[in-house]
Amino acid sequence: QGGGSAVIDMENMDDTSGSSFEDMGEMHQRMKEEEEEEVEGDAAAAEEEDGEFLGMKGLQGQLGRQVADQMWQVGKRQASRAFSLYANIDILRPYFDVEPIQVRARLLESMIPVKMINFPQKIAGELYGPLMLVFTLVAILLHGMKTSDTIIREGTLMGTAIGTCFGYWLGVSSFIYFLAYLCNAQITMVQMLSLLGYGLFGHCITLFVTYNIHFHSLFYIFWLGVGGLSTLRMVAVLVSRTVGHTQRLILCGTLAALHMLFLLYLHFAYHKVVEGILDTLEGPNMPPFQRVARDIPVVSNAVLNATAKAIALTL
Amino acid sequence: LLAELGINFEHIWQKTLTVLNPLKPADGTIMNETDLTGPVVFCLALGASLLMAGKVHFGYVYGMSAIGCLAMHALLNLMSTSGVSHGCVASVLGYCLLPMVILSSSAVFFSLQGTLGTLLALFVIGWCSLSASKIFTSALAMEGQQLLIAYPCALLYGLFALLTVF
């Protein structure tokens, strides 16, 4: 190349074999070329079979149709391959192989803290119980929201309930699993999902009782008692599987805090609306409470104002 | 014409009787043919009786049955040794919706939001889920796991009951 050239020839730059970006680009290009060869090869083969029609129907129309057809086939094959790889539900089959007796025993055990923390406690890697408990929590939340006439402005009741419960189960399990990985605890992801899922049994009982019987003191007793027992059980199992005081403290402190705070949140997020409505009904000049469907915006102004005021006061 | 469409009134009546009597043992072969006429009729009847009670919830009924069928299909495939098809699951769940239609018809005459309504709703949920789990366990040969199948069915029918009661 000439000495006076102002163009920099990138091909002669230093060796960039360590750069993954270029390698990926190269690989991608090579894959695309292979694909195109395959497509052209198939198209050519099909073309040869239909060679005698080409002259009559027009070269471009026939060729275009063949190429489009081949592209569709290739795309479909790739999509089905990806689908069968990621959506293979049979991977989860062993985790659903349970008997009713086992599920009942595990539910009861989830409320009993273990005493032996010196050797690792066994955790059943099962997903049926936890999944059913999460769905039960969703149902209890929905029932609580319906009985307290909660109005969700952006979203739906069902979406909120499912998002909250599944978000907690999957999100907190992943987070604690990550912390467990940092703290060198002996626990797998499925075991963590199972442990936290069964820990929601206490939440289900507490919310089922306190959504129907509205006493604050009763809720606090259940929160400490029932919530505390299920948290203690989870903490004891984790302690038995972790070595080192600091690690145990970090892991178990985080889990206990998140678990107890979640129960507190679930109670108060859907409870204050009940208080608002109860206060409204006790006023002397209030019209009788009208039963309105959720998506009809015509509500009694007094009820609406009183509820908004109650919510603003509690916030 | 009905024979051509595959609508067999005798079979529909047999399956309806099986649902209405949850304590009688079910014949495992009745679900071999996937019949969606009965379920569709029952879903429309549910929507119509909700309409008579002043609630227009056809979309909710449709959405909840679709998602419920998908979820139950996934769960049953995971729990049973022999697989099950979407049509079979939809058929069974649709037939067992009949007691829910009875509940929502009674909602036309009196409000279900009191203690009596709650007890009636719980009874009907139990009835539906017992029938559905009985048919599933006999069709898929899953003895001993009837309670494990009844519970998710109860959750699904509980959602329908929430729709009916509130």
Image (tube, rainbow, N blue to C red):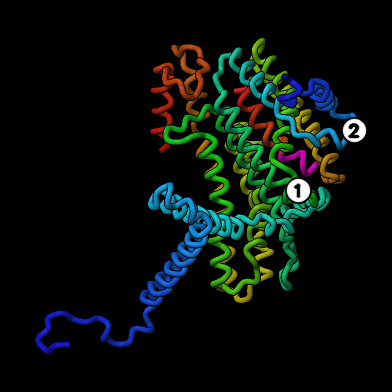
Label for residue B103? Answer: none
Q: Disc 2 residue type? A: Pro
Assess whether residue B116 is covered by the magenta stretch.
no
- Circle 1 residue: B83
In the rendered image, the vertical position of residue A52 relative to residue A159, given as above or below: below
Q: Residue at x 68, y 59 (%)?
A: A91
Residue at mark 1 shares a chain with residue at mark 2: yes
Circle 2 chain = B
Mark 1 or 2: in front is: 1
Kindly identify the residue that appears in the image at 75 percent across and 34 percent down.
Answer: B34
- Residue A62: give x, y in percent of width and height: 43, 50
What is the C-alpha distance between the residues marked 1 and 2?
Answer: 22 Å
Looking at the rendered image, the quarter that the C terminus of chain B falls into is top right
Residue B55's place in the image compared with A212, above or below, is: above
Identity, as a three-letter code, of the amino acid under mark 1: Gly
Q: x, y percentage for residue A248?
A: 59, 70
Question: In the image, is A65 to the left or to the right of B78?
Answer: left
